[in-house]
Amino acid sequence: MSGVDWKKHGFAGVKLDYLLTSAGFFHGAHRATDDCMAVLELLARPLPGQSTTAFATLLAHARKKSIRIWAQGTPFELKDVLKRRGYRWSDGSDGRLKSWYIDVDESKRDSELRYLKEEIYQRDVDILCREISALDRFSNRV
């Protein structure tokens, strides 16, 4: 559900119920088959004010590379600043780093690194970045 910027297209939220209601659908929620069919119907329709379907938008997003930026060793008192910017916390329990991280489009990599160096670290530091493709976007391998 995160592969389409639903709010940008006028949807109230990203939960399936919100998306379906906004699109004018009603379905028997919490049944796997019904949920799958509802998602397929939603993806097959053009997005509001667009000539492309939600599925086409999803595929275009999936084909783009993104960059995971790890903000290691940031001061604890800046956690709320990072959260507001969209960073997520990894506690390290799944084998990933214990650190704040964010996934950004490849085109926004340099500006995000500049933000971290100027606003968060306030110095020049080496920041760990990993390229993410559609094959590992939702994996803990990154």
Image (spheres, rainbow, N blue to C red):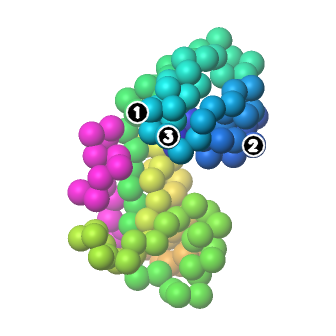
Give the residue at mark 3.
31
Residue 6, how many percent across, how many down? Answer: 64, 37
Above/below status of 84 relative to 36 = below
Magenta stretch, residue numbers: 126-142
Say if mark 3 contacts mark 2, CB within 8 Å: no
Q: Which of 81 and 127 lies nearest the eye of the viewer?
A: 81
Q: Secondary structure at mark 3?
A: loop
User: In the shown orientation, is residue 10 left or right of residue 110?
Assistant: right
- Given this view, does label 3 or label 1 mark the residue nearer the observer? 3
Above/below status of 115 relative to 90 = above
**Residue for point 47% across, 60% down:** 102
Give the residue at mark 1.
62
Residue 31, how many percent across, how many down? Answer: 49, 40
- Given this view, does label 1 or label 2 mark the residue nearer the observer? 2
Task: Give the mark nearer the N terminus: 1 vs 2.
Answer: 2
Spatial CA distance of label 1 from label 2 is 23 Å
Residue 9, how many percent across, how many down? Answer: 71, 32
Spatial CA distance of label 3 from label 1 is 27 Å
Residue with the most extreme top position: 51
Task: Give the mark nearer the N terminus: 3 vs 2.
Answer: 2
Q: Which of 78 and 20 lies nearest the eye of the viewer?
A: 20
Residue 40, how many percent across, how many down? Answer: 50, 24
Spatial CA distance of label 3 from label 2 is 22 Å
